Amino acid sequence: MADSNITKRALATALRELMEEVPFDKIQVAHICERCAMNRKSFYYHFKDKYDLVNWIFDTEIIPFIRRNCDAQQYDQRVELLLEICRYFYENRSFYRKALKIQGQNSFSEHFREYIRPILKLRLTRLIGDTAYDEFTLDFLADAAVCSLERWLLDKNCMPPEQMVTKLLTFVQRCAQALQEEFHEPN
């Protein structure tokens, strides 16, 4: 198992380096293998394609952190988790800017969307119950999260994560407050 992870990490490092030099669509598996002195057979033993490798990078770098912390019960803990996730993306924005531009069926955006759907479902269930939303609502929120991440990271003046989280929380709190007031207005 350790050898498998060493190989995967070497391939991931090679891909990251290549993505700094060449557009993703120009990178071939042969280039990745050449960069880390491996054969294509080794690559395909571990990954289906280069898209799978991009998703594996995300899966191994951020998902373990999220899993360890997703049970945060208190508001401050959830905010800190969101901030840490944003810090990760910000610190790795060069890679994710390129990954988010990948189009197609196996794109990182689709992978990320599918990963966050169960997290959003769990959060919605805790907030409003499991019968108060449907698949459309879940898709809407997943799309909003992915689009927000893309817009933030792809902006040439990408704001720091602390500013991003503050803006997001301020907006959500103001909207919640305005809706609460609107629902309680006398008819």
Image: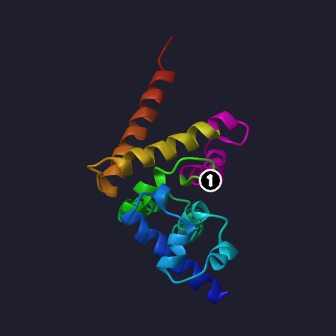
- Amino acid type shown at disc 1: Asn
Read off the magenta span: 109-137
**Residue 75 shows up from this direction:** no
Q: Nearer the viewer, residue 109 or 19?
A: 19
Magenta region, main secondary structure: helix
- Residue 68 % position (x, y): 58, 70
Which residue is most to the right? Answer: 131
**Residue 115 shows up from this direction:** yes
Residue 18, located in which quarter of the rendered image?
A: bottom left
Count every numbered label the image shows and give the total. Answer: 1
Is 52 contained in the magenta span?
A: no
Measuring 67% from the left and 77% from the top, which residue is drawn there?
Answer: 41
- Horizontal arrangement in the rendering, residue 43 relative to residue 95 (left or right): right
Give the vertical position of 81 relative to 147 (above or below).
Answer: below
Residue 45, located in which quarter of the rendered image?
A: bottom right
- Residue 22 % position (x, y): 40, 62
Give the vertical position of 149 relative to 12 (above or below).
Answer: above
Give the vertical position of 92 relative to 157 (above or below).
Answer: below
Q: Nearer the viewer, residue 181 or 12?
A: 12
Give the vertical position of 164 relative to 59 (above or below).
Answer: above
Which residue is most to the left? Answer: 157
Q: Nearer the viewer, residue 181 or 82?
A: 82
Residue identified by numbered label 1: 106
Other-residue count near label 1 (Cα within 10 Å), few / some / many at <14 / 14–19 / ≥20: some
> Which image quadrant: the N terminus?
bottom right
Is 121 contained in the magenta span?
A: yes
Measuring 62% from the left and 45% from the top, which residue is drawn there?
Answer: 124
- Residue 122 % position (x, y): 65, 51
Disc 1, SS:
loop
Measuring 46% from the left and 49% from the top, which residue is drawn there?
Answer: 101
- Horizontal arrangement in the rendering, residue 44 relative to residue 104 (left or right): right
Q: Nearer the viewer, residue 53 or 74?
A: 53
